[in-house]
Image: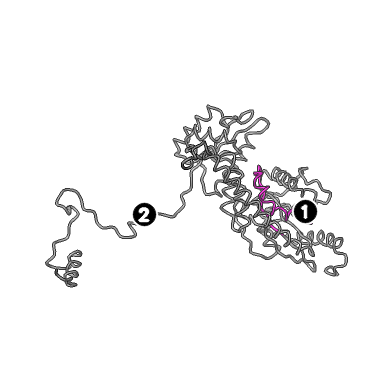
Amino acid sequence: MPSWNPNKQGKFRNSLDGSNPNSSPKLGEGDHPKGGGGVCQKRLSPQQRNTFSTEEVPERAILVAVCPAGQTVERAEEYLAELEFLLKTAGGIALKKVIQKLERPDTRTYVGSGKLEEIKEYKQALDADIIVVDDELSPAQLRNLEKELDTRILDRTTLILDIFARHARTATARTQVELAQLQYMLPRLTRLWTHLERQRGGIGMRGPGETQIETDRRLIKEKISALKLQLAKLDTQKTLQRKNRESLVRVALVGYTNVGKSTLLNLLAKSDVLAENKLFATLDTTVRKVVIGNLPFLLSDTVGFIRKLPTQLVESFKTTLDEVAEADLLLHVVDLSHPDHEEQIAAVNKTLADIHAADKPTILVYNKIDAMEDPIPPTSDLRPPTSDLTTIFISAAKKQNIDALRDLLYEHVSRIHAVRYPYNNFLY
């Protein structure tokens, strides 16, 4: 048996690149290695062969809303504009907005049959990927819409939950979001499975068993119970942390999402908390110590509220919202430049009432006055039900009227401090 000759191996290697004069000539583009017809393609470089891209392609969506009785079309358009901002935050783009005036949403398909055909035509013409609805759909409506339109349907709650899942960073936030998602998913499992055959056991165990959907429902319920226990432990830890802060007055920033709460926190506390022009950029409660004059107090930034905030999120974020419920003073930040800021105030007040925090002393801080040509104090009576309410106009981004806000904070916090800690020498 002949031994292996490294020279021959080298000669073979040279014959591949054509550097050996005795080797056969290279194949041209018109030649075929087996002598047949066709084209022998050039060998691609590694960069050319790697055609997979990690760039996220935005999903194209059609936005749908029903304008019920007692609501104007202009208000429905404002709601769709907010839904478009939610979609943009989630990484999608809106191709078309569809509004239908109905007495109430259709119990079967949310919109009427004629509007459903119109949406189907828009979907085919615009090559849309998803349909987003500006309400929380029932399981039946969700199932029927997916069947009729043959595409993925998202409602407002699903979109908000997706944004929360994208922005969750800490273990507490992830646990809260996962719990909310499972609670929302539980009654909607019927649309997730097509293999609902009954399971079978081994020999002697032939029986009806469980359907796949029953198994999944049981597993989700067990997961929900485990997450609630985990959140209870986290709640105990947060409660202990808050007890350690009882020696200082606590002030909480509340308000609609994307009104500038984090920007105001950075300005007052000289911190560097993430502040972006996105909805729900802040999920976890951030607490910073602020000192004005000779008076220290704690300022906390909490998750922003929104119209039609899913009840699952309010329940799941109880640990985070307890910071608001236990605060001594609320700074209710409002985006004055928003055309619908009065309804945003009402939405925040409703959420504060849900967590039993609506009767706390409140400073109404109208932000973004730099975006107004002629800021006029609003005359709306949408106010929290409290006698201790003060209004001030500022611009956190342009640092306008911030000194007046600091003076106002000092006045309110010192009053609370003198009552709660009369023997403390901070003020003297």
**Is residue 327 shown in magenta?**
yes
Crowdedness near tag 1: few (<14), some (14–19) or many (≥20) residues, C-alpha within 10 Å? many
Task: Tell me the number on the disc at residue 109.
Answer: none
Count of marks, rendered view: 2
Q: Give coordinates of residue 314: x percent, y percent.
A: 68, 47
Q: Give coordinates of residue 135: x percent, y percent.
A: 61, 38
SS type, badge 2: loop
- Tell whether 399 sits left or right of 43: right
- Tell whether 246 sits left or right of 318: right
Q: Give coordinates of residue 190: x percent, y percent.
A: 54, 37
Q: Amino acid at mark 1?
A: Ile
Q: Which residues are magenta?
A: 300-328
- The first of marks 2 and 1 along the sequence is 2
Which quarter of the figure is the N terminus placed in? Answer: bottom left
Q: In percent of the image, x 76 and y 55: which residue is there?
A: 326
Taking depth in this image into account, of 315 and 193 the one nearest to the observer is: 193
Q: Which residue is mark 2?
A: 51
Real-space Cα separation, disc 2 to disc 1, in angstroms: 56 Å
Crowdedness near tag 2: few (<14), some (14–19) or many (≥20) residues, C-alpha within 10 Å? few
Q: In percent of the image, x 74 and y 48: which residue is there?
A: 355
**Is residue 336 shown in magenta?**
no
Q: Amino acid at mark 2?
A: Thr
The mark lying in front, picked from 2 and 1, is: 2
Question: Is 47 drawn above or below residue 65 in the view shown?
Answer: below
SS type, badge 1: strand
Q: In percent of the image, x 29 and y 57: which residue is there?
A: 44
Task: Tell me the number on the disc at residue 363.
Answer: 1
